[in-house]
Image (tube, helix red, strand yellow):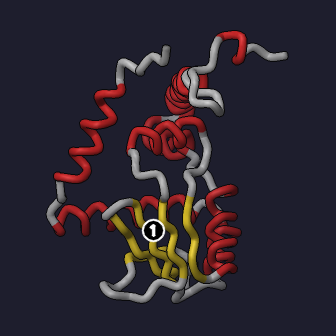
Amino acid sequence: MATQSPFSFLNGLVERAVQVVQPPSWLVHETQQRAVLFLNHVLMQEREAMERLVRQKGRVARVQWRNFNMALVVTPAGLLNVAAEGATPDLQLEIMDSNPLALAQVALRGDKPSLRIEGDVQLAADINWLVDNVQWDVEEDMARIMGDVPAHTLANIGRTVAAAVRQFVGGRMTQADGKPASDADRLPQ
């Protein structure tokens, strides 16, 4: 007998909310601008990332998930900017998993979502390199605001919580046949 997750009702609720709720255009624009500022902040901490992007200046990459999309253009400085409305993308990345909770679960496990990729192979390779090699140094940014010791303490707490969440999510994984993994399946051989 298959047992259903006690949180399965959330899946349907989130699905309906994403389909029904359409944010106003000003909110979409502001969210995209904030995302670009964050991405550029992270990129500026890694010189090699910016050097890779300089080679792609003027190229447009469009990311799409369901009916949400964001087109980014690479600037001559090796950073990103929101592409002009109607800009033709050189690369299109579509996130295939439409379920927001499943997508969050993939992210919590530290995995990449499944993508459909169309367009410029070199731009796709450079973006893949960025995803694999560039990480936000949260602890360094917190240390600028509150000092080294409190930032280190908070970062350690965050890492502990993240590891616990990953372990919880990983423990709830299912087998290939769709059945929940038993405790025996999770034990190391």
Question: Which quadrant, please, contains the C terminus?
Answer: top right
Please tell me how many numbered marks the rendered image carries.
1
Give the x, y percent position of residue 165: 52, 25
Residue 45: which quarter of the image?
bottom right
Whether residue 150 appears in this view of the structure is: yes
Picture residue at 70% right of the left edge, 69% below the top: 48
Give the x, y percent position of residue 115: 56, 61
Picture residue at 48% right of the left edge, 40% below the top: 142
In the figure, is residue 158 to the left or right of 17?
Answer: right
Whether residue 149 appears in this view of the structure is: no
Give the x, y percent position of residue 125: 69, 71
Callout 1 amino acid: Val
Picture residue at 21% right of the left edge, 45% below the top: 17
Residue 14: which quarter of the image?
top left
- Nearest the camera: 138 or 82? 82
Picture residue at 70% right of the left edge, 17% below the top: 186
